[in-house]
Image: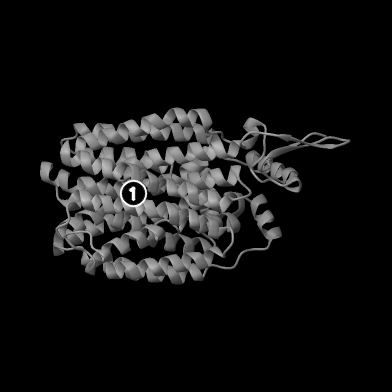
Amino acid sequence: MRMDLAGDACDVVLTENRMQRRPVRVHWAWWVALASFVALVGAAGFRATPGVLIDPLHEEFGWSRGTISAAVSINLILYGLISPFAAALMERLGMRRVVSGALVLVACGSGLTVFMRASWQLMLCWGFLVGVGTGSMALAFVATVTSRWFVRHRGLVSGILTAAQATGQLIFLPAMAALATSHGWRAASLLVAGGALLVVPIVLLLLRDNPRDVGTTAYGTALRDVAEAEETEKAVAASRTGSAARALQVLRQASRTPTFWLLAGGFAICGASTNGLIGTHFVPAAHQHGMPYTVAAGLLAVVGVFDVVGTVLSGWLTDRVDPRLLLGGYYLLRGASLLLLPQLFAPSVEPPIAAFVVFYGLDWVATVPPTVALCRDRFGLRGPIVFGWVFASHQVGAAFAAFGGGLIRDQLGTYDLAWYVAGGLCVIATAMSLRIRPAAAPRDRIEAAREA
């Protein structure tokens, strides 16, 4: 009998008479993680642009901020709603095909915006094309990668891949703000299109759909788990239906449990308080108080710096602490910071707003690793698709907040009410997270995986 297993520094080769150790190169799971990270960075580029381009588009075309925010809302809704179907499509066609196609779609959507002359074209390019493309590489992609390729360090890898979005924001946002100021918003859009296309060869070279495609097992797989994992995977493959049907089937099953609705409700508030509100309206809100666009965009990029630290740390904690407690703490602290935000804006970077940026960055997407872990633990092999639906609720919340923030600004002349409402919702999300039922016993999780 011969079986290759993943380890930190060696493959374990079992024969009938002896066990041998031989040195190996980096486990292929880490190359997959690297390709996934770079793809997510590329996809994050265009999604970082709304806050920078709202005012330039308003000044050039005369479109209201509500109209421009509606395009952002379409993008955010599709970014979420496509996610579970993309996760199911990855089961059918593989991650490499889906991610490569999604990057091309992002490049097309961002590049075509330079030709637009009417608001419906903004909805089509910025809203639909980029929404579908980035949605195909949403956080359900992270859940799929970690579920297939990692047993050990799943939480940590989830945190690192989730931080890719913040890294993309950190890389692209200052450059886009500078380009939009010096050369116009079209130059910023073309930068993102080029960045997305450059990532495609990396994905084709390094991303693989399953460990068995390269003759190995998931990183950290124990000997006793191999036969059981293979048996479960074959059973799932045998019962697999079409991608859309599979996604809807999982939704029907998950929606019968209170855990799903508590996760989805909390994550909807998470989206409203991050991508929808801060990501879309922080820059124009800061500018309203006299801060230059480039300075405000720089602050938002600093959020991305600390987001990387906070998300990786959250992934590390998720491997060690009850994810329910982590979620409750994250939402409570976020709500408190949002309630204070209206008093922190100033024409220049003062210590209070700098402290907010650091704190909010640490908390920005720290919610993702514990949410991915809860979906995996409670729903077994259905976890990535369940997380796709939970993430869809995240983006619905973000879309409402993006549109609502612009509407509040148009009607009241200030964003203050939007910050207060988001802070109160985060307190509700804290209560929802703490009501999620405790983890199932290991045997129950195995049975749940087999029922997926």
Depth check: 351 or 26 in front? 351
Q: What x and y, as percent, mark residue 212?
A: 65, 34
Of 146 and 386, nearer the camera is 146
- The picture places residue 124, in percent across and down from the top left corner, at 27, 38
Residue of label 1: 76
Measuring from the top left, give residue 225's x and y in whole percent: 72, 47
- Is 279 located above or below residue 356 in the figure? above
Which residue is at a point 71% across and 59% down the rendered structure image?
A: 443
Does dot 1 land on a helix, a strand or a loop? Answer: helix
Count of numbered labels shown in the rendering: 1
Between 338 and 373, the one lying in front of the other is 338
In the shown orientation, is residue 174 left or right of residue 212? left
Is residue 25 rendered to the left or right of residue 92?
right
Q: Is residue 123 in sight in this rendering?
A: no
Apparent side of residue 41 relative to residue 181 in the rendered image (left or right):
right
Q: Residues within 10 Å of mark 1 (few under 14, many from 20)?
A: many
Query: Considering only vertical position in the picture, is 281 above or below 86?
Result: below
Q: Amino acid at mark 1?
A: Leu
Q: Looking at the picture, tell me which residue is in the foreground, 151 or 25.
A: 25
